[in-house]
Image (cartoon, rainbow, N blue to C red):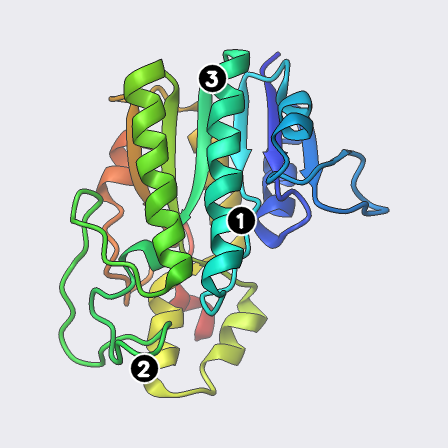
Amino acid sequence: MTRIAVTGAAGNVGRESLTALEDYDVTPITHSAHDDIDGVVCDVSEYDELSDALSGHDVVIHLAANPSPEADWRSTVDVNIEGTRNVFEAAREHGIRRVVFASSNHAVGMYNAADPTETETLELDTVRPVYHDDPPRPDSYYGVSKVTGEALGSYYADRYGIEVINLRIGWLLSEDDLRGTQDGSPEHARFARAMWLSPRDCRNVIRAAVEADLPEPTVTAHATSRNDDRFLSLIWTERALGYRPRDNATEALD
């Protein structure tokens, strides 16, 4: 059976990933101990302990990061960049065949931003679609760290033959939490509707990223639900990963 390691397993996407892959042999990796997660405690910025934790696995889903769009430079370097490099290097060392890297919508967040000085705002008028192969336009140091992670993935795929999926994850929210975003500014409310990733679709896209036969060594794919307000194109995600989003922010808010 395929052995899968999930870094950042205690986070929101991590917990959905554990549910999505419950019929696989999964090793959760967390930064600190959690009573409800039976896994390995490991700091991804410490190479030796991370390498030990990843040894013997076939696939790594790398979610561990400082997830704040407001994160300062040093924290994004230490965890998001150094930690991601460590994951890819350990994958090379141990012959891990696939790394699913949790990139972010913030890697392209300046497209259609209502205010370039604020993250998570979206123009209220016409927006242009953003495709998987459009140039990155990060909206924050966090976004810059995700663009760097995508570049690391491309390097390790080309040089060492590791299969890499850069999954540009939207905004994972329950329906109740999605409703709560609609009380803010119209620009922020529309951003939330555009980027919403339902828990069900999150589980589906993670599983698709593990199981898909990839059309090329590196796949960069957007991961949102099929929202009416979305501008991140899902066409390539559907073709490359076989992902079929089922939920829609507009319908969830009705």
Mark 1 residue crowding within 10 angstroms, few (<14) / some (14–19) / many (20+): some
Asked if 119 appears above or below 136 in the picture, the reply is: below
Q: In the image, residue 181 lies at what x, y percent?
A: 48, 78
Residue type at mark 3 is Arg
CB-based contact (under 8 Å), mark 2 and mark 1: no
Residue holding disc 1 = 78
Q: Residue at position x 58%, y 72% from top?
A: 176
Mark 2 residue crowding within 10 angstroms, few (<14) / some (14–19) / many (20+): some
Q: In the image, residue 51 lies at what x, y percent?
A: 62, 23
Residue type at mark 1 is Asp
Left or right: residue 230 compared with residue 207: left
- Label 2 vs label 1, nearer the camera: 1
Question: Counting residues from the N terminus, which is met first, the one under dot 1 or under dot 3?
Answer: 1
Asked if 211 appears above or below 16 in the picture, the reply is: above
Q: Residue at position x 32%, y 82% from top?
A: 187
Q: Is residue 123 visible?
A: yes
Q: Secondary structure at mark 3?
A: helix
Q: For this rendering, which residue is in front, 46 or 59? A: 46
Count of numbered circles in the view: 3
Q: Residue at position x 31%, y 41% from top?
A: 221
Residue type at mark 2 is Glu
Q: For this rendering, which residue is in front, 153 or 253? A: 153
Residue holding disc 2 = 187
Q: Secondary structure at mark 1?
A: helix
Residue holding disc 3 = 92
